[in-house]
Image: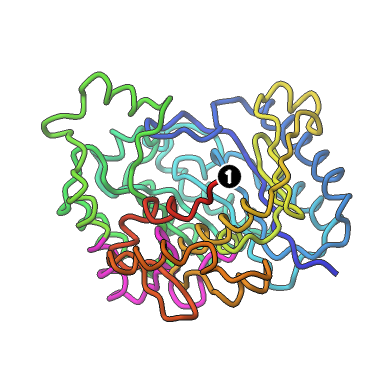
Amino acid sequence: MKDSLMLYLHVPFCVKKCHYCDFLSFVCGEETRGAYVKALCEELRVRGGEMKGRTVSSVFFGGGTPSLLSPAQISVIMEAIREIFVLSEDAEITMECNPGTIHGDAVDSKAEDKVSATAEAELERLVGYRAAGINRLSIGLQSMQEKELELLGRIHDREAFLRTYEMARKAGFSNVNVDLMNALPGQTPESWKETLEEVLSLSPQPEHLSVYSLILEEGTAFSEWERQGKFTGKLAIPSEDADREMYAYTGRRLAQAGYQQYEISNYAKPGHACRHNLGYWTRKEYLGLGLGAASLLSEVRYSNETRLDNYLADPLAGRQEEALGRKEQMEEFVFLGLRTTKGVSRRTFQECFHEEMDGYWHEVIQRNVADGLLLDDGETIRLTAKGMDLGNYVSAQFLLDD
């Protein structure tokens, strides 16, 4: 019997595109969202039907902004999942959401004529998501600073986040992640500390925090603004040293608050590490459904159609596949494992590939240990605090020559 499976469902819709975002997402209307749910369920029944009866350990609704789908639409998708798969009793079922969309009408939550009714509408909607089976919520905050939120192009303000967080707790969510970003244009270590302290002052505190440094991705408004020279003076992007200062402070402060860092960008209260993401980093099999979604099944990587009109016309067409060779599998095993604070086990590598890891990377390991980037206890290699700062640099050294 095969191991349990993870499911990822992509919801590519947003109220508007954030200035830093290069994800596969765009603005659309209610009619298109309805058609998309229908197509997604069709793909789910066909692709999932090929694995009917498999146990699913985690489900992740990512985006885009999955909270633009109504509780009824999420229920329809969850019912289709239950028809095909066996959900484990403790299955982790996560939905990403953005403040400003939870009230359900996809308008700017700062609009004055909406404020009085928003809290009640949000609570009702969140209760609906809980009833549909969502048991973990991931709220996209990014910053507690109003100027930073505006610069990022977020549709919500600080108060909208606080309201959504409060309503999530009232709705019964006891496993909540909050997404944050640092190294933003104009951000200082001091303003970052203020954001972190405000998040830690929430009661109860989030069970999980994801903290990402800004990357200027091609095709985003931010990358274009950088080319135009807009990120200067008070909007200067923090230096690498300032970025590292923020990262180091984050680790220290969150440890003081009872969080355990278990991956380069993720921190959790004991028992609340995101099992779905850990599955990615340990190369667990997952089925990705929806526009542009990726899958890893039996060492074959699949990627879905990326054009919405094509996907709506035939959600089963346009899927690409790539069989991973032994070299790619070993590389992934190491550089994904290095993202985690547990690191890479020599024993597990040997069990998977029937070869010794040091036969490929002995010199690389020793060099990075000498440089203070890796720790090696003979059983496991893992990144040091300095190595976490330079994770991409270290991981690149584990790529094998053709």
Q: Where is 274 relative to 401, above or below? A: below
> What is the span of residues highlighted in magenta in the rendered image?
248-275
Amino acid on which disc 1 is placed? Asp
Number of numbered discs: 1
**355 or 148: nearer the eye?**
355
Left or right: where 222 falls relative to 232? right
Is 331 inside the magenta-drawn segment? no
State which quarter of the image contains the C terminus: top right
Residue 112 appearing in the image:
no
Instruction: Give the image location of residue 162, x and y in percent.
Output: 37, 54
Q: Residue at x 70, y 51 (%)?
A: 296
**12 or 133: nearer the eye?**
12
Q: Where is 41 relative to 398, above or below? A: above
Q: Is the residue marked by circle 1 packed among few (<14), some (14-19), or many (20+) residues within 10 Å?
A: few
Q: Residue at x 33, y 62 (%)?
A: 387
Q: Residue at x 38, y 46 (%)?
A: 160
Query: Where does label 1 land, which residue?
Result: 402
Instruction: Give the image location of residue 149, x and y in percent.
Output: 31, 39
**216 or 308: nearer the eye?**
216
Left or right: where 54 falls relative to 10? right
State which quarter of the image contains the N terminus: bottom right
Is 266 inside the magenta-drawn segment? yes
Residue 187 appearing in the image:
yes
Instruction: Give the image location of residue 371, x and y in percent.
Output: 28, 64
Q: Residue furthest left?
A: 233
